Image (cartoon, rainbow, N blue to C red):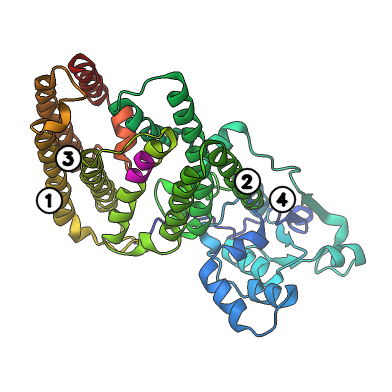
Amino acid sequence: MEQPARQYDFSASTPSASPAAARTLLIDLEGGLLRSELLMEALFSSPGRMLARFGAGGRPGMAALTDILAKAEIDYAHLPYESDVLNQALAARARGEKIYLVAGRFAGHAAGIAAHLGFDGVVAPADLAAGDLPFDRASVARVGARGSNRASFRTWAKALRVYQYAKNTLVFVPVITAHQLNLASLGSALLAFLAFSACASGAYLMNDLLDLAADRQHPTKRHRALAAGDLPISSALAAIPVLWLFAVAAGLCISPLFLGVLGGYLATTIAYSLALKRKMLVDIVTLAGLYTLRIVAGAVGVGVVLSEWLLIFSLFVFTSLALIKRFSELSMRESAGLADPSNRDYRITDLHVIGAMAAASAMNAVTVFSLYVSSTAVTPLYSRPWMLWLLTPLLLYWFGRALMMAHRREMPDDPILYAFRDGPSRVTVAAMICIMLAAI
């Protein structure tokens, strides 16, 4: 079953004295009851279907688009409603008052919302002005618009996934492994970090817009800024091109080749959001490729030769982490008693296979690292290469711990962030860095 919608029972009235029972409460739909924009909700209720209908309609223009949006299938049960306004409506219903929504557009959707909440109907602003009303105008109380719905800095930081910028520190890996720790290289790597962060934030906003309906039925993702109505959809749409333009400008400051890699990352991210994430195992390979592409971009941005050992090792590491991510998401659904995800091509019964593949990929990464340490490639870079063997048990411990935490349902849905937040993981990573520095 899906995440249940919050239930509000306005249908049962508790009549009081006759003067109170004759009163009517008017609630503005947009800006009052709804923490979002009805036009945008209609557009992103099913973006692919909307575009297909628009393309097959044969009547281009805003009129055709408006007709299509008016017929959009909006999930009224999971829309972000203002809790204070709903509480006022509950209190009004308890006093025996009538409740009407005030909506100036998309009357069909407004009527659907009113019916879902058990309100008495919908009136248009024009009807209010003309006095053509199904109730006594003298007995009306109104809950109007709340005013500007400007998102706070914290809301923007949450929507842009600033905490996810930790993943973009992968662009520094080629600088570190190539021992090019000079001011110019670190400056280029920092600019690459900023470019990837802006590019990724735009992609996160786009992904949240496309997943709006699914996120609202998810036990944790429904708290995301767009799904909860904390950030207006129109603001997110305006922010996406700004972020991507900044990423392009930063990329041009590094090199055209770096910009090409960044463009490939963005194109792959868009393809992932639109289609690839719904393909079984294709999403895993894509995620692993996107993580590895950050390392490639770091090498290109700084101008160092990318080691094929590092490339192969990274692919196995990130494949394992992507599989652990899917394992954690599915195990969470299993623990919550939810059905198979509707926007992913996985089933809860796949958990054992996904866990086995994650462990196999992790062990392959350790094997590749061991082969690297025993090769002649380490000699030019390390004066004490034998010390690198100490990293092998640490890698085994970290991967083993990540797999165990995921199996125990104690892993957050992103293992990359887990590595930064988990105490033993931080100690392990710090020990690895110390060993590498000692081996130089």
Q: Kindly identify which residue carries mark 4.
A: 31
Measured as percent of width and height from the top left, residue 282 is found at 29, 61
Quarter that holds the N terminus: bottom left
Q: Note whether residue 329 is visible.
A: yes
Q: Disc 3 to disc 1, how far (Cα)? A: 10 Å
Residue bearing the label numbered 2? 239
Which of the two marks, 4 or 1, is nearer to us in this view?
Answer: 1
Q: Nearer the viewer, residue 356 or 380?
A: 380
Magenta residues, start to end: 291-296
As shown in the figure, which amino acid type bears the numbered disc 2?
A: Ala
Cα separation between marks 2 and 3: 37 Å
Foreground residue among 86 and 97: 86
> In the picture provided, is 224 more to the left or to the right than 293?
right
* Mark seen at residue 389: none
N-term-proximal mark, 2 vs 3 = 2
- Separation (CA) of disc 4 from disc 1: 50 Å
Mark 4 residue type:
Gly
Position in image of residue 33 (x %, y %): 66, 52
Above or below for 347 versus 171:
below
Q: Is 179 located above or below residue 40 in the figure?
A: above
User: Pointer 3: what residue?
Assistant: 403
Q: Is residue 324 magenta?
A: no
| Earlier-in-chain disc, 3 versus 4 | 4
Quote the CA–CA distance across marks 1 and 2: 40 Å
Amino acid type at image mark 3: Leu
Is residue 292 located in the magenta-colored stretch of the structure? yes
Looking at the rendered structure, the secondary structure element under dot 4 is loop
Residue 343 can be seen in this image = no
Q: Quadrant of residue 426?
A: top left
